[in-house]
Image (tube, grey):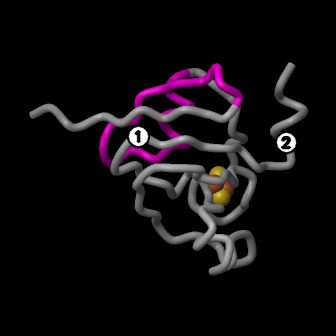
Amino acid sequence: MNKASHKISLTDGETEISCPEGVSVLVAMHRAGLSKIPVGCRAGGCGVCKVRVVSGQYHVGKMSRAHVSEADEAAGVVLACKVFPEGDLLIDPQGKFYKSQQK
Ligand code: FES
């Protein structure tokens, strides 16, 4: 059975990957060999994979409130390891390591 796949784009305008249904954005990014979003605990606890979803439909798993407040979550600021796309997404990485990984 083929699972649906969704397109994940980053706001850098050059990164685009496909993310199968049920796979988190962070895992899909990692599988694609990209390190644009930092990988930490992969369990919603450490906060390094924080991103802002600019547009698109998704649902989230359990995330540490120490890193994502309810207001953050409502504004689309979420942890990529716990973001499961339900459609194509545009994502803006927020992690503090993002800039240092650019070059
Ligand atoms: S990798 Fe630790 S919160 Fe996502």
Who's the residue at 87% across and 35% down the image? Answer: 99
Who's the residue at 58% across and 70% down the image? Answer: 63
> In the rendered view of the protein, which quadrant contains the C terminus?
top right
**How far across and how far down the image is residue 84, in percent?**
42, 52
Viewer-closest of 79 and 11: 11
Q: Does the magenta stretch include residue 15?
A: yes
Is residue 41 visible to us here? no
**How far across and how far down the image is residue 62, in percent?**
51, 71
Mark 1 falls on what kind of element? loop
Mark 2 falls on what kind of element? loop
- Reply above or below: 56 against 8: below
- Reply above or below: 16 against 21: above
Viewer-closest of 78 and 91: 91
Q: Which mark is residue 97?
A: 2
Who's the residue at 69% across and 39% down the image? Answer: 37
Q: In this figure, which residue is indicated by the disc labeled 1?
A: 88
**How far across and how far down the image is residue 89, in percent?**
48, 43
Please identify, in this view, whether the residue under mark 2 or under mark 1 is nearer the observer. 1
- Queried on whether the Cβ of the residue with tag 1 lies below 8 angstroms from ligand 1, the answer reads no
Is residue 70 left or right of 16 when viewed as pictured? right
Q: Residues within 10 Å of mark 1 (few under 14, many from 20)?
A: some
Q: Give the range drawn in magenta.
A: 12-32
Is residue 46 left or right of 4 when viewed as pictured? right
**How far across and how far down the image is residue 25, in percent?**
50, 43
Who's the residue at 69% across and 54% down the image? Answer: 50
Q: Quadrant of ligand 1?
A: bottom right
- When asked about the image quadrant of residue 92, the answer is top right
Instruction: Report the amino acid beneath label 1.
Output: Asp
- When asked about the image quadrant of residue 5, the answer is top left
Instruction: Report the amino acid beneath label 2.
Output: Phe
